[in-house]
Amino acid sequence: MVSPATFHVVTTELVVGTFALAGLCFALKLLSSFNILPNSKFDEAFDSIAHGALLFGLLSLPFAILSGVNSASVDERGFVSALLVNKLWLSFAGLGIAIGVLISRWKVGIEIWNESKSSIIQSSFGMAACGAILLTASVGGKFTRGESLLDILHLPYDLVLLMPIWLSVILLISGLANFVIAMRTSSSQ
Amino acid sequence: MRVKTTLILCLLLLATNLGAAEPGGVGDGVYDMQCGGACHGDSDQNATSSASLILTTESHIYAGQATTFSLQVESLTSSPYAPIGLFLLSDTTGYRDTPQDIGWQILSDSKGDVNNYIEISGLTDGDTIDWVLRAPEIGNYTFYASIQHGGNNAPHFGISQAYTVEVLPIPDNLPRLTEEFTPIVAREVGQVTKFQLSTEDADTVVVEWRIDGGVANQAIVTGDAVNGFMVELPTANQPSTMQWRAVLDGEGPQQTSPWFTLVTNEQGFSIDETAVYLQAISVLIFFAGLTVLLQTRNRTNQNKEEKSFDEITSTVSQEGGEL
């Protein structure tokens, strides 16, 4: 039987690798949208790779989160460190943004890159998802080994910004409302 | 030839043992001697430890009273094994052989917990570790100590001689701690430690404390035999190990409790898990919704602009003009 810690290593490697690839392609696509990159014949490839890698990372992410929670014994002893809490939130934020990016691409189609504003939104959110996941991985390194590559940024990993439950509920409702409005707007077009 | 080689390799693979080493130990806990079928207990794999184990306690203990079991480890080889696992056991069958299995209750161990198995790094020759146990009903009981460690690529194992103790009935008027009293074994840095000392037939109580076997000091004790004694131990400013004991006086002979171990740890992290998970889900939904909404709204605005542009174009062309 593979232990949760080993399974977590495998799944996080999948997630980090695919999200990093997606992030890179989103960045190149953004440069291309501003004509900073020469009119590239890889434009369509960037779009496909970015969203394909994001989808694959998205499928691996729940396994990484669950195995991470199990390997850190969160179920038995609760969250033993502020790092674990921040790790969970960052990964869920990355998951949410990635879902949003993929739904947007599915609903709008390839035309999403035709206009500069929508290109910026799509690329920025794609890179934000990538950033959230890379930060999550960095917190993981800090938790297990006491150091991480992003230590140079002196990020406040130990600081936990826990919202009151009522505020979380409001955030949840507003998120659902955003979804409903977006879907209605999309279906009326 | 290839088929034969493949078959031989397959046979060799099938002949291998399936096992898992735990070079870093398994952590403290309440374990039987075999420790869930560990390599150390397997006579086919293990090697005999050079360590000699000397288990001592009082030979006569009163029923329901606490006593200290001290284990001295000697003749360890110079190899720096880390960690070394030490057991307090009630027999050597490897199954249901913890002190709890014969009715004894572990009140404290050397590490601020209540385990019969302790892992220690940096143990040297002559070091002693203690367990404080509460005796069950009257009778004779046998105890063993066992050691497990690594070294020379082999799981080492050693066991002490049997040590028998006799549990006697409590004499009349013996000043003592009640059978219900359970000492605190761990606390956090800065935490005030105040507890009620439940006693029977004790008129006066003196509580002594010391740090790591140092000089004994007196703790603050308030109250009386009728209303109960309240003990206040000094607050620790840093992680440390304190020991304390009670000296009880009454009509019967003076009694001194064992040294109970109280470990002070760094403040633990605690957080409302429900709020954490709810915030995580809220953040997920919010960001997903926000991303989709921004794109669809942007697309709607774009469509409107295109539509109004088409309308203007058609109006101009109907009027025969040119844009």
Image: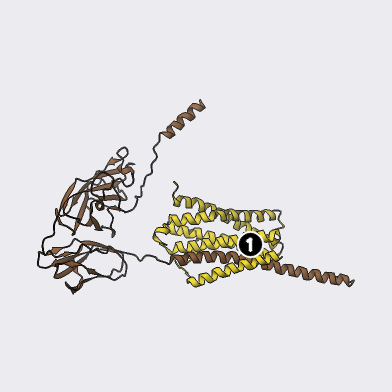
Residue B65: quarter of image: bottom left
Q: Quadrant of the C terminus of chain B?
A: bottom right
Q: Position of residue A155 (x, y in %)?
A: 49, 65
Residue B273: quarter of image: bottom left
Is residue B162 at all visible to an observer of this figure?
A: yes
Q: Position of residue A2 (x, y in %)?
A: 45, 47
Work out whether B78 lies above or below B64. Answer: above
Residue lying farthest top? B1
Q: Which residue is drawn at 47% across and 29% down?
A: B7
Residue lying farthest right? B320
B142, A144: nearer the viewer: B142
- Chain drawn yellow, letter? A
B316, A171: nearer the viewer: A171
Work out whether B188 lies above or below A7. Answer: below
Q: What residue type is labelled 1?
A: Ser
Q: Is residue A160 left or right of residue B148?
A: right
Residue annotated with mark 1? A123
Is residue A36 at all visible to an observer of this figure?
A: no
Residue A57: quarter of image: bottom right
Q: Position of residue B76 (x, y in %)?
A: 24, 47
